[in-house]
Amino acid sequence: VQLVESGGGLVQAGGSLRLSCAAPVSIFSTKAMGWYRQAPGKERELVAAISVGGRTYYADSMKGRFTISRDNAKNTLHLQMNSLKPEDTAMYYCAAGTNIATVGSGSWGQGTQVTVSS
């Protein structure tokens, strides 16, 4: 496993969580990174992505609530999630790709569970 997620947990609706993904420098320094999520019975969806240069993409339902960032000094990707809703409950995965459009085509983490209670 090359990507290691952390930071998931149980939070009440309206609360916040910050996910982190540690990656080897060989991946982090050259790849776009992103977060996917998958809820039970649903397809996996791209939440947000960020290029090596810091350009970002967000799925419409996450805009204004989630912020993706990368700490290049620590080779760590973050996802700050605010105003969480029960529908945000899912397993969240860190992934890499050549660019934003192909995040998910490279390495994946094992996932971290986020549960939002109403």
Image: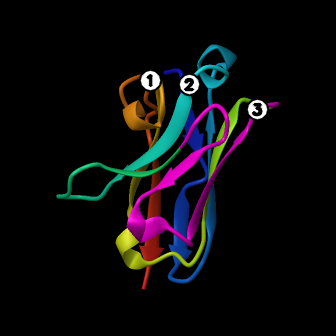
* Marks 2 and 3, the one that precedes in the sequence: 2
Contact? badges 3 and 1 (CB < 8 Å): no
Per the image, the residue denoted by label 2 is: 31
How far apart are the alpha carbons under marks 1 and 2? 10 Å
Marker disc for residue 107: 1
**Residue 19 relative to residue 37: left or right:** right
* Marks 3 and 1, the one that precedes in the sequence: 3
Image spot of residue 108 (x, y percent): 43, 29
**Residue 118 relative to residue 5: left or right:** left
Regarding mark 2 in the picture, which secondary structure is present there?
loop
Q: Amino acid at mark 1?
A: Ser
Contact? badges 1 and 2 (CB < 8 Å): yes
Q: Amino acid at mark 2?
A: Lys
Image spot of residue 61 (x, y percent): 40, 70
Image spot of residue 88 (x, y percent): 41, 68
Identity of the residue drawn at 36% across and 26% down: 105
Which stretch is magenta?
50-73
Identity of the residue drawn at 21% across and 52% down: 43
How far apart are the alpha carbons under marks 2 and 3? 12 Å
Marker disc for residue 72: 3
| 115 vs 67, nearest the viewer | 67
Identity of the residue drawn at 61% across and 64% down: 17
